[in-house]
Amino acid sequence: MAKEKTVYSCTECGGSSPRWLGKCPHCEAWNTLVETVPDAPAGGGKNRFAALAKSTPVTVLADIEATEVSRAPTGIDELDRVLGGGIVEGGVVLIGGDPGIGKSTLLLQALDNLERAQIPTLYVTGEESGAQVALRSRRLGLDHSQVKVLAEINLEKILATLANTRPAVAVIDSIQTVYSDQLTSAPGSVAQVRECAAHLTRAAKASGTCIVLVGHVTKEGALAGPRVLEHMVDTVLYFEGDTHSSFRLVRAIKNRFGAVNEIGVFAMTERGLKGVANPSAIFLSQHTEPVPGSCVLVTLEGTRPLLVEIQALVDTGGPSPRRLSVGLDRDRLAMLLAVLHRHAGVACYDQDVFVNAVGGVRISEPAADLSVMLAITSSLRGRALPKGFIAFGEVGLAGEVRPAPRGQERLREAAKLGFSVAVVPRANAPKKGSRDLEGLTIHPVDRIEEAMEVVRSLA
């Protein structure tokens, strides 16, 4: 079979060129031409849109029967939580993370559990040999694993194997190593990644096989390759965490079959990744006595409330004081310092300010504002917050403390873990007589000045 001649299409205007050019001849944009395979003309070239016609008739939305998608649990509770309950037939999952963080380990464990549940699986490895995969399975204690392994990077051979073996779940590790004979570019290029992912997605939808694609990430932590890769798939998962720490977080950025921003917490052990039943414990430092600069935040990750310790260190700075944050937005830290100075009278303009979220977790919600500001004030004044103290709430530029979503669930999680004092927005204050909040004294506030006054009265 002769190889199809490739063309170069512009990612900006959609124009094409028979050869690569630095500038698109149509829209004159630079470096936008990528290699593509032209669609074969349908009907002898008379109607090039015939191939796009759907065989199913047009149906009124109200007449379509909506059924719940069936899921197959992977046997790993934290992974099932992120996926929305388990794998879905015909679904395509993209999972990315830093090298060595545990992507292949977790997927190999999941495939072994599925195979033990009589669900046929296939592990396609393009970065390792079959012997290397077998060696890892021995280290994980999977000595008698029946997972089928294919060491292959050619797309056409992978698709043929999927058609012959028809597994229920297939893992492609990784999509950056797969290449198609129809393209002349090297594996890992934008054209190869996009075309190979598109073919695998179509194969998953046609056969009902759930395909998991492992993707590389850039230095900034984003998935490498074209952004269209994330739009093709049904679910996008990110591995987070420090490779020097034993804890890992898997976060759902996109999920057509479940909630987004859901997280699963794992601990790396000698036998692979194990789910953490009480993740709040790993984000709290075990201080024997309260220390200055520490404030516990109740954050919300998907449907799960988590208690995370926010640590701040304020030290004498030079003519250009530094503002550094780990796990929190640096620009938001600068804004909070300005609000703290203007409305609470706490000046840090000549101080170095360092803020850290313990445990390697990344907090993006604004409900962390109040905890960050109280931790900074505690470090600056050298006064520790009371024992068993928590706080959450968004702080606006006018100094008002705004409510956080699902505040009752946050308070219940804090009470369950034995915390006794809480400073929260007034709108999140519960009604009197809440039995599930017994032992937790709640101080509702409207402004940041009130929160500072409450903390001073408790010290």
Image: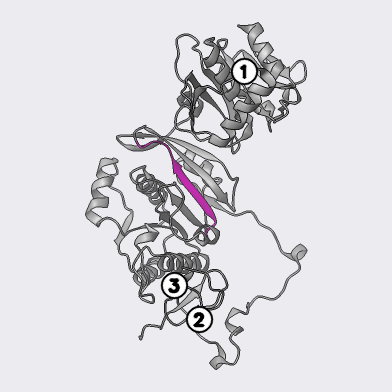
Decide which of tag 2 and tag 3 comes sooner along the chain: 3
Residue drawn at x 61%, y 12% as measured from the top left: 420
The secondary structure type at the circle numbered 1 is loop
Residue sitting nearer the eye, 90 or 407: 407
Q: What residue is pinned by disc 3?
A: 22
Amino acid, disc 2: Asp
Q: Is residue 234 magenta?
A: yes
Q: Quadrant of the N terminus?
A: bottom left
Q: Is residue 329 visible?
A: no
Where is residue 315? Give x, y as percent. Answer: 47, 19
Are the residues tagged 3 and 1 within 8 Å (C-beta)?
A: no
Residue at left offset 37%, top offset 57%: 174
The magenta stretch is 233-243
Is label 2 in a helix, a strand or a loop?
Answer: loop
Q: Where 198 falls versus 425 (above or below)?
A: below
With respect to residue 397, does 197 lie above or below? Answer: below
Residue 117 in view, yes or no: yes
Mark count: 3
**Sooner in the amino-acid sequence: mark 1 or mark 2:** 2
**Tag 3's secondary structure?**
loop
Q: In the rendered image, which quarter is residue 234 located in? A: bottom right
Instruction: Please name the residue that numbered disc 1 is placed on.
Output: 346
Residue 63: name its quadrant. bottom right
Label 1 vs label 2, nearer the camera: 1
Task: Give the mark, 3 or 1, whose residue is nearer the N terminus.
Answer: 3
361 and 30: which is toward the camera: 30
Give the x, y percent position of residue 66: 69, 58
Q: Please tell me whether residue 325 is drawn above or below residue 415 in the rendered image.
A: below
- Residue nearest the observer in this picture, 185 or 131: 185
Disc 3: CA contacts within 10 A as few (<14), some (14-19) or many (>=20): few
Q: Which numbered marker is on residue 39?
A: 2
Q: CA distance from mark 1 to mark 2?
A: 64 Å
